[in-house]
Image: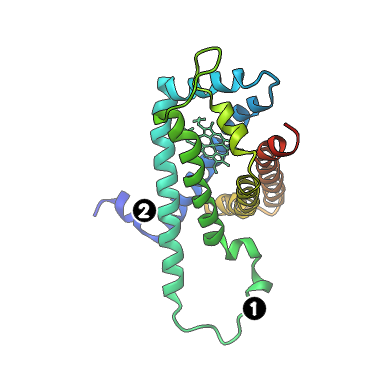
Amino acid sequence: MSWFTKTFSSTIGRKLLVAITGLFLCSFLVVHLIGNLQLFSADEGVAFNAYTYFMTHNPVIRAMEIVLLLGFAFHIYEAVVITRRNQSARSVKYAVNRPEQNSNWSSRNMGLLGTVIFVFLLVHLYNFYFKLKFGEVSLDAAGNKNLYVIAVESFSHWWYVALYVISMIALAFHLIHGFQSAFQTLGLSHKKYTPAIKAFGYFFSIVVCAGFAAMPLYFFFLY
Ligand code: HEM
């Protein structure tokens, strides 16, 4: 077995992979949020449609899509393996076990939060990504696929807005724990810097998730 396979099949190696891919996915979220802010341009979707055209036709972005897919795949797979190992490692329960005193709710429910985000992703990719790439979508005045009308139509249904808002709450809790946990796994634990990393993690998670949640809420209530 090569050192690479050995390292990444050990629990600490798997944790490292979850941490690295998790931080990479955080950087994707920032880029994705900034791009989607075009939805708020008062131009009936011209800027947003031009942006989505760019995202699906630029060769660098298309290559990054493969890296992104691998990032998601490794992050989910390794996290599932670690969770299952942790569950089977202790078949006999502790006599005294007060998890709520030793850890916070998000850290104990990362699997549940991850599952909500995964379901959200499937619905989201089907509605936006697959329609953009393979679907029959009308064209706007500039000749780009009019994904803006799909956003307006989707976000006019309360249940669709609820799915997005609930998923963004789950994503916020997932990120709040995940962000600081990733730094800990990478060995960046210091009594001076850890509180700052934690505070930044809170700020990052809330701003990013509130930004995404603002989009469906804007179209439902204000458009
Ligand atoms: C209201 C919020 C959101 C809107 C309006 C939105 C919109 C879009 C659109 C238009 C696309 C296709 C064009 C493109 O690739 O950029 C897309 C793709 C994608 N979205 Fe979102 N998105 C939102 C939130 C999210 C969130 C929170 C996540 C992750 C948890 C996410 C993950 C993805 C992924 C993985 C893709 C395909 C990858 C890519 O090629 O960029 N999106 N989204």
User: How many residues crowd mark 1 within 10 Å: few (<14), some (14–19), many (20+)?
Assistant: few
Q: Position of residue 182 (x, y in %)?
A: 55, 51
Taking depth in this image into account, of 188 and 103 the one nearest to the observer is 103
Q: Residue furthest top?
A: 142
Task: Give SS at disc 2.
Answer: helix
Q: List the residue tagged with mark 2.
A: 8
Amino acid of disc 1: Arg
- Mark 2 close to ligand 1, CB under 8 Å: no
Amino acid of disc 2: Phe
User: How many residues crowd mark 2 within 10 Å: few (<14), some (14–19), many (20+)?
Assistant: some
Q: Nearer the viewer, mark 1 or mark 2?
A: 1
Q: Residue furthest bottom?
A: 95
Image height of 180 relative to 23, above or below: below
Tell me the tag on residue 98: 1
Q: Residue at x 64, y 78 (%)?
A: 98
Determine the image quadrant of residue 210.
top right
Q: Residue furthest left?
A: 1
Determine the image quadrant of residue 131.
top left
Taking depth in this image into account, of 73 and 192 the one nearest to the observer is 73
Report whether 85 appears left or right of 119: left
Q: Position of residue 117 (x, y in %)?
A: 54, 51
